[in-house]
Image (cartoon, helix red, strand yellow):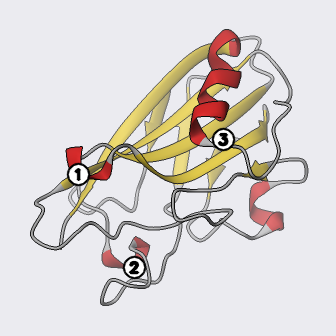
């Protein structure tokens, strides 16, 4: 499986428009993400974005579960827009405490932060989780269903 994020400037850096609104110029637009080479038997997908910088403590920026097996991309700004995500999919609570996407807002002068975008291909059509599920509960629920996973990393700092 392969994952792509066409918004990453020079193939590496998150554009400011994808940053949280607390960042100057940030519009909190979820980035476009696409995936290919999906394994046979895939029944659904999960997408996560984590900040892997040590000061962030694996901050969850976005988690969508129960994406249909037919889906191969999310367009920019898809978070919170049912027509762009698909019926039956669920955006769970991020580390800001909100459902949906919460863009990068790293502490000033903490250096570059790596934002890992991962798509998991699952052998189950849905996960029995609600919107208040934690990232730990989500990752635990997918463990026995992962057929493949792929990631791409974007960098952001302020």
Whichever of callouts 2 and 1 sits on the residue coming sooner in the sequence is 2
Q: Residue at x 31, y 63 (%)?
A: 14
SS at mark 2? helix
Q: Which residue is mark 1?
A: 55
Mark 3 or 2, closer to the camera: 2
| Mark 3 Cα shell of 10 Å, populated few (<14), some (14-19), many (≥20) | some
Q: Which residue is mark 3?
A: 72
Q: Is residue 54 above or below residue 87?
A: above
Q: Is residue 3 above or below residue 29?
A: above
Residue 17 in the image, given as x and y percentages of width and height = 40, 79
Q: Nearer the viewer, residue 141 or 147?
A: 141
Residue 65 in the image, given as x and y percentages of width and height = 73, 41
Q: Is residue 52 left or right of residue 76?
A: left
Mark 3 or 1, closer to the camera: 1
Whichever of callouts 3 and 1 sits on the residue coming sooner in the sequence is 1
| Mark 1 Cα shell of 10 Å, populated few (<14), some (14-19), many (≥20) | few
On the image, which quarter does residue 143 sit in? top right
Real-space CA distance between mark 3 and mark 2, rounded to the nearest whole angstrom: 23 Å
Question: How many marks do you count on the picture?
Answer: 3
Mark 2 or 1, closer to the camera: 1
Q: Nearer the viewer, residue 63 or 70?
A: 63
Q: Report the disc number at residue 17.
A: 2
Q: Is residue 64 left or right of residue 50?
A: right
* Residue 150 in view here: yes
Quadrant in the picture for the C terminus: bottom left
Real-space CA distance between mark 2 and mark 1, rounded to the nearest whole angstrom: 23 Å
Q: Report the disc number at residue 94.
A: none
Residue 85 in the image, given as x and y percentages of width and height = 75, 57
* Residue 39 in view here: no
């Amino acid at each position: 499986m392969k994952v792509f994020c066409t918004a990453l400037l020079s193939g590496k850096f998150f554009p400011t428009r994808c940053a949280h609104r607390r960042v100057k110029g940030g519009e909190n637009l979820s980035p476009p993400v696409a995936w290919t080479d999906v394994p046979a038997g895939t029944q659904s997908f999960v997408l996560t974005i984590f900040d892997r910088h040590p000061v962030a403590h694996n901050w969850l920026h976005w988690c969508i579960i129960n994406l249909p097996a037919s889906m191969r991309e999310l367009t920019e700004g898809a978070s919170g827009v049912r027509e762009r995500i698909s019926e039956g999919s669920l955006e769970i609570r991020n580390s800001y405490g909100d459902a949906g996407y919460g863009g990068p807002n790293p502490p000033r002068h903490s250096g570059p932060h790596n934002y890992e975008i991962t798509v998991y291909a699952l052998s189950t059509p849905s996960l029995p989780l609600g919107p208040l599920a934690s990232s730990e509960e989500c990752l635990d629920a997918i463990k026995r269903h992962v057929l493949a996973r792929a990631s791409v990393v974007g960098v952001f700092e302020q």
